[in-house]
């Protein structure tokens, strides 16, 4: 369990504890009358609040959702081009909770290229809106291609010819944004957004 999840659990438990304490203080006059037995009675709402908070937490853990988990590079081999190997940069999309996320669609946008969001492809999947049942899947962001002494950046579009631009300082410093949708899973409210150069350098510091 990650640190963030542990903190969330602690926060929920404390909320239940405080609620139970509040209920106890409302009955403090009765507790004084009951004497020592009142001390044990006071524990009941505290314990109940904590158990309720834990139940809410575990129900939340079961909720089906998708979230961004950074980027990952993949090697792409082109045998017909003399076994050319290119670098494809993908966004890691992690599934959480129970069940399968249906009709998962990914879209990207590149700043200042005259394009709004458009559908992109999933790595190793021909279906543009797949069912995600495994822990994570990779959404294509861009591919760096060097052929005939020319270096380009390629952006994939579902059912359309990919967009290609020159690999230069202007283009690699453009910001790329991605968002995802699903028929039945909770998705991030905000898009994933980063400069192309930052993504490349994060996986190749010497670039």
Image (cartoon, grey):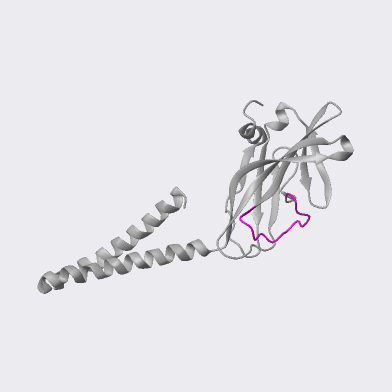
Q: Is residue 127 magenta?
A: yes
The answer to whether 42 is drawn above or below residue 69 in the figure is: below
Residue 168, percent across and down? 74, 27
Residue 37, percent across and down? 14, 72
Residue 141, percent across and down? 70, 43
Residue at image coords 33%, 63%:
16
The answer to whether 125 is drawn above or below residue 51 in the figure is: above
Residue at image coords 78%, 39%:
154
Q: Is residue 135 magenta?
A: yes
Is 4 on the left or on the right of 29, as rendered? right
Residue 73 lies in quadrant? top right
Q: Predominant secondary structure in magenta?
A: loop
Quadrant of image for the C terminus: top right
Q: Nearer the viewer, residue 58 or 153?
A: 58
Q: Nearer the viewer, residue 107 or 138?
A: 138
Q: Which residues are magenta?
A: 123-136
Residue 40 lies in quadrant? bottom left
Residue 97 lies in quadrant? bottom right
Residue at image coords 62%, 28%:
205
Q: Residue furthest right?
A: 80
Residue 88, percent across and down? 73, 40
Total numbered labels: 0
Q: Nearer the viewer, residue 34 or 135?
A: 135
């Amino acid at each position: 369990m990650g640190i963030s999840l542990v903190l969330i659990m602690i926060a929920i438990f404390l909320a239940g504890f405080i609620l139970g304490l509040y209920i106890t203080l409302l009955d403090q006059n009765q507790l004084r009358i009951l004497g020592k037995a009142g001390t044990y009675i006071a524990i009941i709402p505290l314990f109940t609040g904590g158990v309720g908070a834990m139940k809410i937490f575990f129900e939340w853990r079961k909720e089906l959702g998708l979230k961004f988990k950074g980027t990952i590079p993949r090697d792409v081999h082109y045998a017909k081009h003399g076994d050319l190997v290119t670098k494809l940069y993908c966004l890691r999309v992690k599934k959480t909770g129970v069940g399968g996320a249906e009709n998962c669609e990914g879209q990207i946008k590149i700043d200042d290229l005259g394009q709004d969001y458009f559908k992109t492809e999933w790595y190793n999947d021909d279906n543009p809106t797949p069912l995600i049942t495994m822990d994570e899947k990779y959404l294509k962001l861009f591919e760096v291609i060097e052929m005939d002494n020319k270096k380009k950046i390629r952006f994939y579009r579902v059912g359309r010819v990919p967009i290609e631009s020159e690999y230069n300082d202007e283009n690699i410093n453009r910001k790329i944004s991605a968002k995802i949708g699903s028929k039945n899973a909770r998705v991030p409210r905000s898009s994933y957004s980063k400069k192309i150069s930052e993504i490349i350098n994060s996986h190749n510091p010497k670039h």
